Image (cartoon, rainbow, N blue to C red):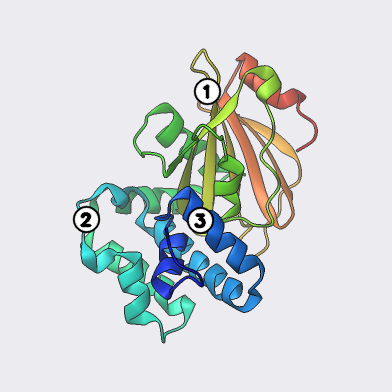
Amino acid sequence: MISMPPSERDLHAYVDHQLSEQDRRLVETFLASNPQVAMQVRAWQQDAQQLRAALSGALQQPANPELDPLMIRQRLKRRSRRHLASAAMLLIAVSIGGFGGWQAREMTFVSTQLPMTDALQAYRLIAQQGFLPADYKASDDGDMQGWLDRYFIQAYRLPDFAGAGFKPVSGRLLSTEQGPAAMVVYENQGGQKISFYVRPPGPKNNLLPRGSRSDGGLQAEYWSGGGYNYAMVSPTDTPAAQLLRQKVQF
């Protein structure tokens, strides 16, 4: 168990999700009563979000101390957060390459096409083909909302499809030209999957009207709200797709 008040190393461990459940709760209680420290921790979380999104599929590479988020923050702590994110993405583009670089580039290219094409592509890569492993898997407490809130504090709550037999089982961070994105995969007992996708509207504030479209055997329901763009994706002409079309409030 960590001691109170938490050290800087303890706070970094909290940001990097390395604390036990008991220690995590101690840190959150401390942050609730120390707003200045909480503000610094939120800034670190934003840095970690950009690093994790930039790393994308490369997270499965062998451990490299030079890429450890804590070490990077310590080396670059006097630089701006913007410089930190740019340096991390450049490092990955030069030294990692391979599939991770292809995936990040693919997500960037497709996001400039029809509405939420990146959400459809993410579903294919993760839910259908399993090319990218999950960053987070739902535990017994099912706190997928808590995981999403670490990166998208003001985003809409996850839709509840428990009545239809779908529960959130995993989450994945992605990188797009509009900014970091996340996809939560729902699954029922029959193995059918639907996804909830969220990302910012980008520097041009490209918010979307509510809409629906099909592409390559997938159905996407998309909309905007709370400063983010959203999409729910499922295979076309399935009970899951019908469920999404009938869902009128998110």
Q: In the image, 126: left or right of 231? A: left
Element carrying mark 2? loop
Residue 96 appears left or right of 159: left
* Residue at the spot of label 3: 24
- Residue type (three-letter) at the residue carrying disc 1: Gly
The dot on residue 236 is none
Q: Is residue 224 left or right of residue 75?
A: right
Vertical comparison of 64 with 119: above or below:
below
Element on which disc 3 rests:
helix
Say if mark 1 contacts mark 2, CB within 8 Å: no
The residues tagged by marks 1 and 2 sit, at their Cα atoms, a distance apart of: 38 Å
Disc 3/disc 2 C-alpha distance (Å): 24 Å
Q: Percent position (x, y) of residue 108?
A: 45, 54
Q: Which residue is tagged 2? A: 63
Residue neighbourhood size for the residue with mark 2, other residues' Cα within 10 Å, grouped as few (<14), some (14–19), many (≥20): few
User: Of discs 1 and 2, which sits in the foreground?
Assistant: 2
- The image quarter in which residue 32 lies: bottom right
Query: Which numbered disc, 3 or 2, marks the residue closer to the eye?
Result: 3
* Kind of residue at badge 2: Ala
> In the structure shown, which secondary structural element does the residue marked by tag 1 occupy?
loop
